[in-house]
Image (cartoon, rainbow, N blue to C red):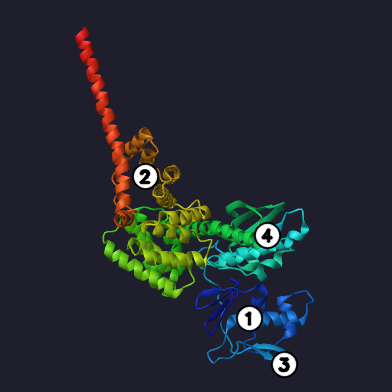
Amino acid sequence: MGKRFAFGPLLLDARMGTLSRDGRVLAVGQRGLLILRTLLEAQGEVVAKSTLMAAAWPGLVVEDSNLSVQIAALRKLLGTTSEGAQWILTVPRVGYRLAEAAAVDDTALEQADAGSADGGRRPSIAVMPFKNLSDDATQEYFADGVTEDVIAALTRFRWFSVRGRNSSFVYKSRAVEPKTAALELGVRYLLTGAVRRSGDRIRISAELVDACDGRYIWAGHHDFALLDMFEVQDTIAQQVAGSIEPELLKSEAGLAAQRRCSGSVTGWDLVARGSWFFHQVTRPTHLQARALFRQARQLDAGLPEARMWLGRVNAGLIAYGWSEDPDADLAEGLEAALQAVQMDEKSPYAHYALAIVSVYMESFALAIRAAEKAAELSPGFALGHLVLGMARLFSGDAGKAVESLECGLHLNRYDPQNFIWYNVLSLAYLFSGDASEALQCATTSLKVRPTWRSAMETAAACCTALGRTPAARQWLDQMTKLPLASGDALQPLWRSNPRWAGELQALLDTTLREAHAEVLAANGHAECERAQGKRTS
């Protein structure tokens, strides 16, 4: 059985171990939750300090000042009642009590999936203290600093909840199984890691695990040269967080796609399922995703992610040529993205949605501002950098586009839609005068999606620029064997930059002319041989 305590705009979910305000999960430590739950269970009656300390520090002897620190943090987090009073009141020389009794729901929390630790609601993750594997034990502070910075970087994504530092560091000197820690912390996902420093080099290794079924979702490592300690620490956090977030999204989308619809389906569940369909990148799945995002918006009017994804999927339908009414889809996408930003202005995803819709509206200045805001809010957010690069290229700045696109692709090398981003990067390199790098990026795009016509066209142009006419002809031959694409994701680029469109076409025309000349020369040579044969017979 699990209790839920509602007081004012706040809700403490005892089984989930979460505190939320107006549906958004707040960052609060485990001891703070235990103290708050004890106060809520007292229903406005006075609770002795000793009782609160026993609840938060069972079996331990601690100073009274520790309780005072926790109470102060809770007061700051909870804010005030509708009448302006503190939620937690001090009863001198006795203890504390709540200003108002809470409404209590004693029923068991419904679960959308029996194996889910979050009951179909927003996913949750805890970052366990990173281990110091260096020979120098004094480097423990550096491992702790990396852990804290990764927690902070993950909280910026906002679509999942992250347990605070105080909750995670309870396990620094306590060895427990991942599933046990996840249950105690009320999370589904655990991130574990280690720091190894050797001389002026640092290696960070990390693993993301689904504690419900033991699946390893992601594992990786990053190597850094130690120059400025704090700058490196911040870079580590952004790269680790940037690597984890897309994998967490894929895991949630896959779980949601397998989950059967039930009467208890939530708006978030619909969003997660829609994101799975979205990443299949076909017209039917994009349309199915949009239907789910619309349904989520209707079911949960306070869910900004439903609007963010609605804006994003409409941009995708237009980019791939799958929209039956581009003007209407752009209008719906822009409205949804603007609403997402208004509902959660600190969400990098909301600003990304506004940026990608603005790109296809050819409002590049707005797209750049929105993309810069997304990257500013979460420097480890790959899509923020990627759409910034796209907007910069489409607005005519190939040099700056390369920088942003390289950053985004470094943060997330495995996105199912990276074939577009590598294609855009190849064009940014080509129009910056580096055909060799452009060709490499175009071929990488084709490794992700071998039938992407635009990347074949770019590869052919690059080969021509490098004097590799036979290779260019091979790319064009492959391209002509494919069915015509229903749309062109790069149309805004060509419409806004006719000079670049002309340069690309000129390279392709050169390949075709040289191929035609070779055919004529070959035919002429054959005719000469036939004529010579007749003369000697």
- Secondary structure beneath label 3: loop
Image check: 510 left or right of 54?
left
Determine the CA span between mark 3 and mark 1: 18 Å
Image check: 197 left or right of 361?
right
Residue 458, label in figure: 2
Residue plotted at (62% across, 70% down): 164
**Residue closest to the eye, 112 or 230:** 230
Q: Position of residue 76 (x, y in %)?
A: 61, 82
Amino acid identity at mark 3: Pro
Instruction: Give the position of the C terminus as an image quadrant.
Output: top left
Amino acid identity at mark 4: Phe
Determine the CA span between mark 4 and mark 2: 44 Å
| Sequence-earlier tag: 4 or 2 | 4
Q: Nearer the viewer, mark 2 or mark 1?
A: 2
Q: What residue is pinned by disc 3?
A: 92
| Sequence-earlier tag: 3 or 1 | 1
Residue plotted at (50% across, 55% down): 407
Amino acid identity at mark 1: Leu
Q: What residue is pinned by disc 4?
A: 130
- Secondary structure beneath label 4: loop
**Residue closest to the eye, 44 or 429:** 429
| Sequence-earlier tag: 4 or 1 | 1
Amino acid identity at mark 2: Thr
Residue 74, label in figure: 1
- Secondary structure beneath label 1: helix
Determine the CA span between mark 2 and mark 3: 75 Å
Q: Nearer the viewer, mark 4 or mark 1?
A: 4
| Sequence-earlier tag: 2 or 3 | 3
Q: Position of residue 6 (x, y in %)?
A: 55, 82
